Amino acid sequence: MASIFKAYDIRGLVDSELTPDFAFQTGMAFARFLEQEREPATVVIGEDMRPSSPLLAEAFAAGVISNGMDVIRIGLASTDLLYFAAGKLNCPGAMFTASHNPAEYNGIKLCLSGARPVGKESGLLAIEQMVANGMPLTQRPVGKEHQRNLLHDYAEYLLSLVDLTQMRHLKIVIDAGNGMAGYTVPAVFEKLDVEVIPLYFELDGTFPNHEANPIDSANLKDLQKAVKKHGADLGLAFDGDADRCFLVDELGNCVDPSALTALIAARELAKRPKSTVIYNLISSRAVKEVIEENGGKAVRSRVGHSYIKKLMAETGAIFGGEHSGHFYFKEFWRADSGMLAALHAIAALGESKKSISKILAEYQRYFASGEINSTVKDAQGAIAQIKEKYGKDSELTLDELDGLTVNGDTWWFNVRASNTEPLLRLNVEAKTQARMEKLRDQVLGEIRG
């Protein structure tokens, strides 16, 4: 139980951990939780292309129905399509996906009405305890199941949020990774002046070509080759449930997600000046600079979607970006949408005569290490040692919003402990490549002894 209830969702091995019986029990627990929260008595349920998803979604739906609530099955969906459904219909939702995990995994992402997140601190722990204690059947009216296809409505809504009317013709390579973007991209792009060169659009939850995890650069090699081969203007890579999007420029180079965060922030602030924008603490320092240069208020967040969504609600922020490729929009119920982020990049490119690399150049001001994981016996002890060392330097500033961040004049680094593994995660950024590499090696030496 404890191993599959994560901080933000439920995820585990099919058959040994995630079974139809478990899904049924979780559906019952979710319905009871929603009843306690006085949520609407209809749950919208979506599923990805994994072979196990339909059976698990069906069992979960049966659990919800047995507890007297109705369900709306929307069938195949990306996670952001599920969030759209939960927002548009104002219903709680459940998405069956394991995102970028390998084929033998599946999972459940839950949300409240209006696509509000359900994490450990906002209901997932209560649901876990109900499942652990057993969910006895009670005598109550059985709910009803309805079917509804919202793909067209989803595409129309996204297109209404971004002005794509002034575009020049573009050639774009899109790698769906055999995931749900292969289902949603055709519906969204059919009305755009874009030639799409598809890679791995066939829905296949066994991921025969590469993992649907674009944060790992090894999974972007096919896209990089195709962009250069076809002389494309842009490459897009989506993860398995298509809630994250990564860019490859016309030269075949991977684009830092912080640069896309800065680009979207500038575009959103042009529409709503002086607004708040959220960025997480491992985003490039350039993000904060761009937000402030464009008249916005930059608010720094812990890593994790539940923290960003909570901060967005508290501050009224119009946009939030994470270095992991998640992008959150106020107009999209503060939920994340890789497709909406992609449309912003396409609009910026399509209305300019510049290439995407030149458009993004002004947002790429620093050199980053990327996230480096180290196995340690005592993560908190290692952080304490680093704090003691760098805390002695009066010219540095330290904060513990999430792990430990040490700020110098032209550099910073952050060390955070993993929630689930004996790992320390290190991110380093500096004004020059040489300074970044020197600092990276120095801190890694302290972590690894």
Image (cartoon, rainbow, N blue to C red):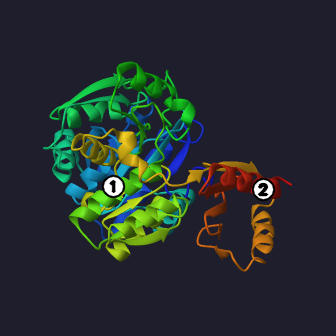
- Residue 8's place in the image compared with 342, above or below, is below
- Residue 263's place in the image compared with 169, above or below, is below
For mark 2, give the secondary structure: helix
Q: Is residue 104 visible?
A: no
- In the picture of the structure, the residue carrying the numbered disc 1 is 264
Q: Quadrant of residue 149?
A: top left
Question: In the image, what residue type sits under mark 2?
Answer: Gln
Numbered badge on residue 205: none
Q: Quadrant of residue 196?
A: top left
Residue depicted at 63% across the width and 49% down the height: 433
Left or right of 376, for residue 399: left
- Residue 181's place in the image compared with 281, above or below, is above
Question: In the image, what residue type sits under mark 1?
Answer: Ile
Left or right of 122, for residue 437: right
Q: Position of residue 1 (x, y in %)?
A: 60, 52
Residue at the right extreme of this rendering: 449
Of label 1 and label 2, which has the lower sequence position?
A: 1
Residue depicted at 42% across the width and 48% down the height: 361
Q: Nearer the viewer, residue 40 or 224?
A: 224
Q: Quadrant of residue 422?
A: bottom right
Q: Position of residue 75 (x, y in %)?
A: 29, 37
Left or right of 444, for residue 193: left
Numbered badge on residue 442: 2
Q: Is residue 11 visible?
A: yes
> Alpha carbon of mark 1 to alpha carbon of mark 2: how far?
34 Å
- Residue 189's place in the image compared with 137, above or below, is above
Q: Position of residue 365 (x, y in %)?
A: 50, 55
Label 1, residues with CA under 10 Å away: few <14, some 14-19, many ≥20: many
Residue depicted at 70% across the width and 50% down the height: 437
Q: Position of residue 356 (x, y in %)?
A: 35, 40
Residue at the top extreme of this rendering: 229
